Image (cartoon, helix red, strand yellow):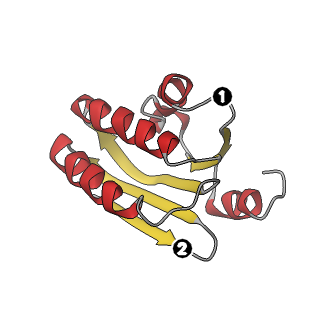
Amino acid sequence: MFQTEFNKTKNLLSFIFSGQVTPEETRRWREKLTEVLRDVQPGFTLMTDLSGLDSMDLGCAPDIESSMEALDEAGISRVVRIIPDPRKDIGLNIMSRFHYDPRVRIVICNTMEEALRALAGEAP
């Protein structure tokens, strides 16, 4: 399952992945992302919460990679990821190196509290 939210005031895009995520779901997520990216302003931040993720099918990778490229083209400046279990990284850190500009700052947090501090500009 996935959830996408955009806070226009904060220029903050949020993705929440939970349960078992399939390629069908990431295709729908990517389509939703296309709509949401119309509203973001360059310099936006992305918060990705994987704390409820059980597993993600390997077939989801192409959708994630193309989404990263779309986010990069839209002007993403920072990514804050909540990954309480490093085994649930699902390859995002490696994919980021290839699909985000090196200027994009990536912060990995263990909890939502850490992520909120990172979003507020404090060190996680």
Q: Amino acid at mark 1?
A: Pro
Q: In the image, what residue occupies the spot 55% across and 74% down?
A: 8
Q: Position of residue 107 (x, y in %)?
A: 68, 43
Q: Which residue is mark 2?
A: 7
Q: Nearer the viewer, residue 87 or 41?
A: 41
**Place of residue 18 in the rendered image (x, y in percent of width and height, measured from the top left):** 35, 56
Q: Which residue is found at the position 30% from the left and 39% from the top?
A: 56
Q: Which mark is residue 102?
A: 1
Q: Quadrant of residue 61?
A: top left
C-alpha distance separating marks 2 and 1: 25 Å
Q: Residue at x 57, y 51 (%)?
A: 82
Q: Image height check: is 30 above or below 4?
A: above
Residue type at mark 2 is: Asn
Q: Is residue 104 left or right of residue 2?
A: right
Q: Position of residue 13 (x, y in %)?
A: 51, 62
For label 1, the SS is loop
